[in-house]
């Protein structure tokens, strides 16, 4: 940068001084001398097309036709600079006094190409290895100057870094430059187009000479592109790039900013920057291309985040490390729903099928600690939260240290994986949760009142809430204390065998409710539900369609005996249908099966008693009449057979004794 400006200023002084001192010599000859000197100093070819018209009063100056400066010999991008014309004016009185005071410069449609070769050579460096004779000792190089006003119209600048493989192009450049003090303040007003996005910039340099040398100096910047605006007030330098100061940025939807950066705009969720992004705080940019924000405030739509952050650009992806403190977080955009279902609540016909876009997870890695006063997830409303978020290659892990919710706490881990499609999983514990408000927010279900604990592990794959719920897999358990089931009087059904005990004003009071479950293919299955009530006990088993939003569940309830001994009645209750309109009925088939089973058991018991009585009579008769005594573990048949064998043995012994002459 400093070589270009110093060399151009030296050439201006050389040409105009020659015109001022040799005004009797034709202008074309003076231009030829200037061109030869320029070529010798820079090692580049300067071509001035058309006429060169000097002026001597009221100001010393020159106007040219089209000009062209050749590029470095290793470049294949054409001329380094070309313009349709140049106009330069200098204060003659100041020049006679030895001061270079440029009152006006105008460049018409300049085209500038700045290049860095793969080996690090730069086409804007002249002298030495860059070609030509220019050095810091060359007369005019580095000489202080001032500039009242420079005007550029219809310009273009292209920066090509062959080493990095990047190309940055600005077109339709128009602007003005004012340098009233070489060592002091300078101002630039610019408009241009980059990547098809128009923008304007107002720049104030507090120390122009430091800027030429690439050193850090005072800088104020106001950059605007469409609805986006960035303001910076502090210190900055370009050799290498570094800055520190306060920033105030209102970035809109990031569409204009993304265009200027040459990247796709991130698809931020509603409530988290989909409509507007704003940033303010103390900003530091280091020589290693890292960015640091302290005392920052980030506003995403209506969500305000107090932020300290560090962004590093080394590696495959940028990495963000941040500590964020928030008030009320609106995270409904993450779930794509306002709650419960496509139309909200248990009455909805299904879950939202809108595609959930998590492509923003792949733009950078992150480690972010968040503390918030509350969070609205759409499906649920949370209180004070402490969460650590880690993002690695489009996989986000939410380590939930503690979240207050519905008079209880939530802890565990929640994962959103966007590496190949979308999958969502977690291992969460809910302790002391108030069930009615939680279930109301989650599914519009208000019939379960009480507090309880819930543990759940789950995994869902799909690109919408509907797909995730339809394919959900997992397991868990629940344990609730005292509570009520509203709209259902199981005791009344048992007393009257009438399923009409459903509706407003009806309820079942319980002391505890426990069970475990598994989830497969979006269907929750349970077989060990146990409900204990002051006047009945109940067990349950069946399925809950989390994806289909339906029920197929059986409750077997037994009424406890009252003070008069009445009760003990057992009946199975069947609950089927949609969440929006479940149907309650007595399971008559199961009830008949139970009665048949009871009758069969009664008859079998009677038969066993009668058989036992007959067997006892037979045993007594055999013993009294035949002398047969049944031994332990021996059937009557075996006892009789044994007695026959004994009788045969006794007879044989008598016969043998007679044959042997015994008594």
Image (cartoon, rainbow, N blue to C red):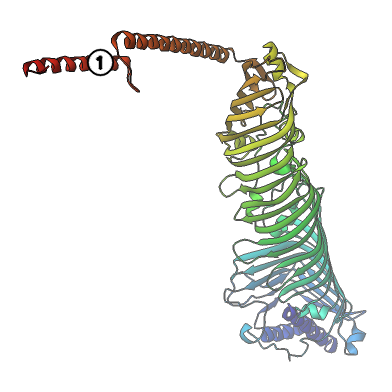
Picture layout, residue 136 above or below residue 120: below
Where is the N terminus found, in terms of image quarters? bottom right
Q: Nearer the viewer, residue 341 or 75?
A: 341
Residue indicated by mark 1:
643
Across and down, in percent, residue 31 comes to 75, 82
Q: Secondary structure at mark 1?
A: helix
Image label count = 1
Q: Quadrant of residue 529?
A: top right
Residue 448 rendering spot, x and y as whole percentages: 73, 29
- Residue at 71% x, 86% y is 37
Position of 223 relative to 642 (above/below)? below
Q: Is residue 270 above or below residue 284?
A: above
Residue 448 visible in the displayed image: no
Quadrant in which the C terminus appears: top left
Check disc 1: other Cα within 10 Å, few if <14, some if 14-19, many if 20+.
some
- In percent of width and height, residue 268 lies at 71, 48
- Res. 101 visible in picture: yes
Residue 40 drawn at (x, y percent): 67, 86
- Residue depicted at 66% across the width and 39% down the height: 454
Residue nearest the observer in this picture, 212 or 635 = 635
Foreground pick, 204 / 106: 204
């Amino acid at each position: 940068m400093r070589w270009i400006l110093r060399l151009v200023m030296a050439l201006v002084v050389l040409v105009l001084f020659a015109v001022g001192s040799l005004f009797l010599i034709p202008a074309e000859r003076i231009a030829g001398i200037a061109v030869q000197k320029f070529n010798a100093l820079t090692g580049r070819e300067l071509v001035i097309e058309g006429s060169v018209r000097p002026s001597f009063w009221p100001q010393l100056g020159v106007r040219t036709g089209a000009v062209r400066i050749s590029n470095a010999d290793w470049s294949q991008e054409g001329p380094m600079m070309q313009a349709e014309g140049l106009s330069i004016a200098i204060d003659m009185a100041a020049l006679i006094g030895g001061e270079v005071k440029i009152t006006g410069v105008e460049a018409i449609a300049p085209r500038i190409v700045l290049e860095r070769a793969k080996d690090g050579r730069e086409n804007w460096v002249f002298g030495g290895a860059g070609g030509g004779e220019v050095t810091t000792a060359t007369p005019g190089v580095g000489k202080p100057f001032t500039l009242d006003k420079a005007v550029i119209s219809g310009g273009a600048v292209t920066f090509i870094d062959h080493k990095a493989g990047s190309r940055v192009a600005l077109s339709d450049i128009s602007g003005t430059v004012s340098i009233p003090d070489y060592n002091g303040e300078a101002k630039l007003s610019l408009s241009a187009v980059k990547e098809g996005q128009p923008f304007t910039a107002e720049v104030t340099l507090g120390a122009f000479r430091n800027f030429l040398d690439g050193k850090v100096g005072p800088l104020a910047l106001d950059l605007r592109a469409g609805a986006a605006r960035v303001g910076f007030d502090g210190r900055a330098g370009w050799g290498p790039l570094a800055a520190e100061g306060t920033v105030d940025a209102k970035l809109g939807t990031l569409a204009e900013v993304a265009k200027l950066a040459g990247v796709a705009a991130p698809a931020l969720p509603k409530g988290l920057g989909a409509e507007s992004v704003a940033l303010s705080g103390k900003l530091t940019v280091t020589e290693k291309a890292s960015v640091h924000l302290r005392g920052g405030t980030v506003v995403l739509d209506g969500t305000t985040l107090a932020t300290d952050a560090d962004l590093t650009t080394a590696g495959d992806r940028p990495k963000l490390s941040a500590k964020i403190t928030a008030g009320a977080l609106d995270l409904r955009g993450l779930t794509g729903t306002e709650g419960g279902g496509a139309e909200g609540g248990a009455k909805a016909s299904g879950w939202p099928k809108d595609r959930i876009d998590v492509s923003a997870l792949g733009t950078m890695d992150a480690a972010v600690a968040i503390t918030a006063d509350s969070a609205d997830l759409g499906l649920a409303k949370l209180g004070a939260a402490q969460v650590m978020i880690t993002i690695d290659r489009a996989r986000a892990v939410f380590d939930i240290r503690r979240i207050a919710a519905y008079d209880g706490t939530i802890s565990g881990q929640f994962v959103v994986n966007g590496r190949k499609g979308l999958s969502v999983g977690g291992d969460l514990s809910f302790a002391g949760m108030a069930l009615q408000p939680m279930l109301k927010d989650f599914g519009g279900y208000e019939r379960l009142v009480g507090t309880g604990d819930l543990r759940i592990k789950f995994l869902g794959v799909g690109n919408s809430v509907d797909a995730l719920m339809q394919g959900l897999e997992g397991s868990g358990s629940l344990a609730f204390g005292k509570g009520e089931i509203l709209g259902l009087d199981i005791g009344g059904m048992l007393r009257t065998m009438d399923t009409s005990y459903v509706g407003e004003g009806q309820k079942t009071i319980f002391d505890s409710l426990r069970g475990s479950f598994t989830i497969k293919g979006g269907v929750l299955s349970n077989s060990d539900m146990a409900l204990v009530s002051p006047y009945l006990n109940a067990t349950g088993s069946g399925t809950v369609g989390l994806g289909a939003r339906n029920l197929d569940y059986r409750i077997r309830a037994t009424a406890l005996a009252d003070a008069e001994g009445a009760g003990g009645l057992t009946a199975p209750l069947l609950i089927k249908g949609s969440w929006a309109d479940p149907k309650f009925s007595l399971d008559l088939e199961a009830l008949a099966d139970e009665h048949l089973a009871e009758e069969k058991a009664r008859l079998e018991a009677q038969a066993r008693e009668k058989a036992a009585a007959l067997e006892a009579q037979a045993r007594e008769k055999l013993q009294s009449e035949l002398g047969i005594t049944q031994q332990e573990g021996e059937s009557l048949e075996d006892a009789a057979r044994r007695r026959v064998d004994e009788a045969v043995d006794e007879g044989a012994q008598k016969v043998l004794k007679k044959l042997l002459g015994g008594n």
